[in-house]
């Protein structure tokens, strides 16, 4: 990761077709666009690649979550369960619908713990969003079984796991909707962009209409603007240039994953020199999109000491427990209910907090996260870099 490492002639050629048509917009302009419909083509290619019946392109991974939640009818007074280790976008989208995010623990997969999920379900739970963090599978089969038993839809936040699979089936196709991000740091990128996939035609139609102001997208002799609409929507439309880049990147995705799997094997071997090291539980190695390698050391003090040596040797690992964007206790704006809205929305209604978050509410996650270190696995990994990383790890093994 990420896909920008391998921008090339393919992306440029795709973009040039759009510029030569002169039509940057995904809808309308049929006469001028010379048969170029890049976003539509990208949606069809992405659906075919993942095995979903339908795909809906949008402007970002956050927008994809918002569109999926809106299509499922999630709103004010509802609760949506996600995990305490994810990017802030997951709960931003929930709050933006007016719903309340509820956080479940992660286990050694660093994804949602199904047993804790089950404990957090209430009559108000209207959706469950497990996240396939760092390219690898959540326990999606167990999560889906629990959700089905309670009649609650699952949205898979697959922002970080494009190209990932579980036992041969693409991540994002287990739940009602799978959402993807193509931002600057994701496995495949369109600059900014996102996608929703589903095999439920009704949901797809709702998502398609919602992201385009509610335009009803039925054949309409009156042309654009003459249609009616069934509900209020918003604008999350993807541009043709993004669709074009997406087509070029999607064609490279399996190659990206194969390169990362190879580089991840290098990291795994190099990290194995650390005494007492344990690796993140991966449910299906063959389906791992291999964007990150995460390992655990025996305790927090040892983790700090080892990473200090690694940093000094120029090969520091990411310690997510110290990261302000991906880990529950570090989200002070969520914990303190910070918002520009004078009425306190979405944290407060009528001057009263809807929910108070306790930074210590996820002790099992904390015990795991404080021992975890992560290397991001690049697509391109020059030999000099490998030598440096291996040497740093040998040094750290001796502390
Ligand atoms: C990146 C990311 C998103 C949001 O995607 P954007 O395209 O940046 O809006 C959502 N969820 C997770 C887990 C992410 O990593």
Image: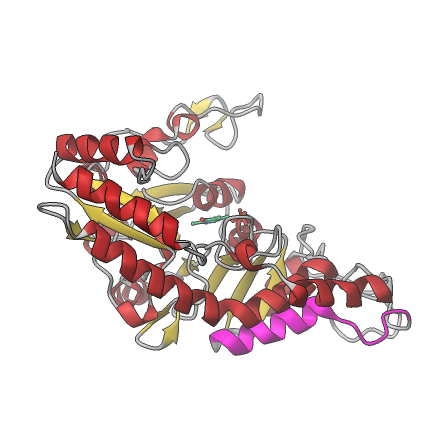
Q: Work out whether residue 105 can be spotted.
A: no
Tell me if 51 is positioned left or right of 231 in this view.
left
Residue 130, image x, y percentages: 35, 55
Q: Residue at x 28, y 58 (%)?
A: 266
Q: Residue at x 52, y 30 (%)?
A: 345
**Magenta segment, prevailing SS (helix, strand or loop):** helix
Residue 198, image x, y percentages: 50, 70
Tell me if 348 is positioned left or right of 280 in this view.
right
Q: Residue at x 85, y 70 (%)?
A: 33
For the residue pair 399 and 391, the one nearer the viewer reads as 391
Label count reads 0
For the residue pair 240 and 184, the one nearer the viewer reads as 184
Asked which colour scheme the image uses, the reply is secondary structure
Residue stretch rendered in magenta on the structure = 32-50
Residue 126, image x, y percentages: 40, 54
Which quadrant does the N terminus fall into?
A: bottom left
Residue 272, image x, y percentages: 16, 53
Tell me if 394 is positioned left or right of 5 in this view.
left
For the residue pair 389 and 150, the one nearer the viewer reads as 389
The relative height of residue 382 versus residue 206 in the rendered view (above or below) is: above
Please check the rendered image and state whether residue 87 is part of the magenta-colored stretch, yes or no. Answer: no
Give the quadrant of residue 202. Answer: bottom right
Give the quadrant of residue 257. Answer: bottom left
Q: Work out whether residue 386 can be spotted.
A: yes
Which quadrant does the C terminus fall into?
A: top left
For the residue pair 197 and 258, the one nearer the viewer reads as 258
Tell me if 311 is positioned left or right of 90 in this view.
left
């Amino acid at each position: 990761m990420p896909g920008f490492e391998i921008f090339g002639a393919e992306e440029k050629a795709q973009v040039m077709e759009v510029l030569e048509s002169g039509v940057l917009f995904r809808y309308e302009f049929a006469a001028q666009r010379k048969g170029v419909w890049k976003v539509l083509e990208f949606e069809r290619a992405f659906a075919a690649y993942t095995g979903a019946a339908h795909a809906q392109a949008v402007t970002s991974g956050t927008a994809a979550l918002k569109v999926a939640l809106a299509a499922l009818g999630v709103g004010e007074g509802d609760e949506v369960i996600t995990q305490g280790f994810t990017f802030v976008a997951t709960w931003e989208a929930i709050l933006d619908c007016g719903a309340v995010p509820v956080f479940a623990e992660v286990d050694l997969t660093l994804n949602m713990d199904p047993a804790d999920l089950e404990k957090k379900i209430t009559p108000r739970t209207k959706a469950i969003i497990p996240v396939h963090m760092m390219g690898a599978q959540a326990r999606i089969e167990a999560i889906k079984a629990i959700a089905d038993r309670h009649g609650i839809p699952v949205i898979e936040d697959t922002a970080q796991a494009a190209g990932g699979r579980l036992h041969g089936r693409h991540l994002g196709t287990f739940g009602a909707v799978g959402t993807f991000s193509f931002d600057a740091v994701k496995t495949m990128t369109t600059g900014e962009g996102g996608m929703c996939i589903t095999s439920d035609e009704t949901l797809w139609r709702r998502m398609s209409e919602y992201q385009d102001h509610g335009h009803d997208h039925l054949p309409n002799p009156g042309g654009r603007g003459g249609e009616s609409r069934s509900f209020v929507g918003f604008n999350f439309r993807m541009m043709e240039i993004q669709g074009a880049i997406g087509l070029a990147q999607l064609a490279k995705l399996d190659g990206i994953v194969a390169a990362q799997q190879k580089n991840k094997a290098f990291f795994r071997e190099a990290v194995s020199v650390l005494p007492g090291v344990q690796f993140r539980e991966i449910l299906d190695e063959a389906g791992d999109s291999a964007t990150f390698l995460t390992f655990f050391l025996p305790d927090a003090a040892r983790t700090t000491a080892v990473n200090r040596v690694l940093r000094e040797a120029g090969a520091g690992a990411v310690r997510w427990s110290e990261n302000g964007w991906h880990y529950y206790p570090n989200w002070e704006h969520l914990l303190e209910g910070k918002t520009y809205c004078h009425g306190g929305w979405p944290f407060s209604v009528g001057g009263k907090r809807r929910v108070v978050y306790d930074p210590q509410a996820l002790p099992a996650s904390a015990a795991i996260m404080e021992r975890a270190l992560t290397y991001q696995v690049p697509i391109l990994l020059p030999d000099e870099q490998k030598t440096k990383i291996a040497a740093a790890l040998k040094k750290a093994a001796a502390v």
